[in-house]
Image: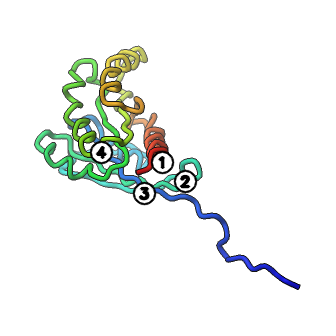
Amino acid sequence: MLSIMTPRHSKQRKKRFICKVAIAGSSTVGKTTLLYRYERNRFIPALKTIGVDFIAKEIIVDKKYVTLAIWDFAGEEKFLELFPAYCAGSRGGLVCFDTSTALEIDLMENLSPWIQILREVNSDIPLLLVGNKIDLLSSDSQLDEITEKVQPIIKKFNFKGLRFTSAFDGRGVNEVFFDIAKLMTMYPK
């Protein structure tokens, strides 16, 4: 009688991706606090980031194992010239702004330097625009106004979408990282 031997690990291996994500935006928009909320699932008031912060977290997206290597870069303008070196090799990016001040400032002027560097270094990566601190808004109509205000930015810089988050209460945080991971696996390098 003939028997067929199969290897011990004959199951098909799951696809694995390691994806570097750059988080960009001005100082005090809540980038580091957003990262801490995602990593530890709790609100940790962040101190100012000096240089860069980094975490790695593995998630499953559409039956693919994705290790997110997330680089949080300091938002002070004096560090802007170092940003290209840190975002090199990124497969996706989150560009963050503070929703509590979004209606009072020129977001195009505020975000353009970060976006331009991301696009110069990695022209074809998916980017999401992230409005953080929604817990500080007094009404849902403010979200509508902000959504309207950022449309020119989304179009000009070819963002894949707009997401709103609150690092304070956790709204939208897991979803934004899942969404960028999904986009990165759809557009692999």
Asked if disc 1 and disc 2 are in contact, CB closer than 8 Å, the reply is yes
Query: Considering the numbered disc 1 on the image, is that residue within a helix, a strand or a loop?
Result: helix
Disc 2 designates what residue? Answer: 64
Three-letter code, disc 3: Ile
Residue 130, given in percent of the width and then of the height, sits at 36, 33
Q: Quadrant of the N terminus?
A: bottom right
Three-letter code, disc 4: Asn
The numbered disc on residue 132 is none
Three-letter code, disc 2: Lys
The numbered disc on residue 185 is 1
**Mark 4 and mark 1: Cα distance apart in space:** 16 Å
Disc 4 designates what residue? Answer: 122
Q: Which tag, 3 or 1, sits closer to the chain's start?
A: 3
Query: Considering the numbered disc 2 on the image, is that residue within a helix, a strand or a loop?
Result: strand
Q: In the rendered view, tell whether residue 53 sits above or below residue 134.
A: below
**Mark 2 and mark 4: Cα distance apart in space:** 23 Å
**Mark 4 and mark 3: Cα distance apart in space:** 16 Å
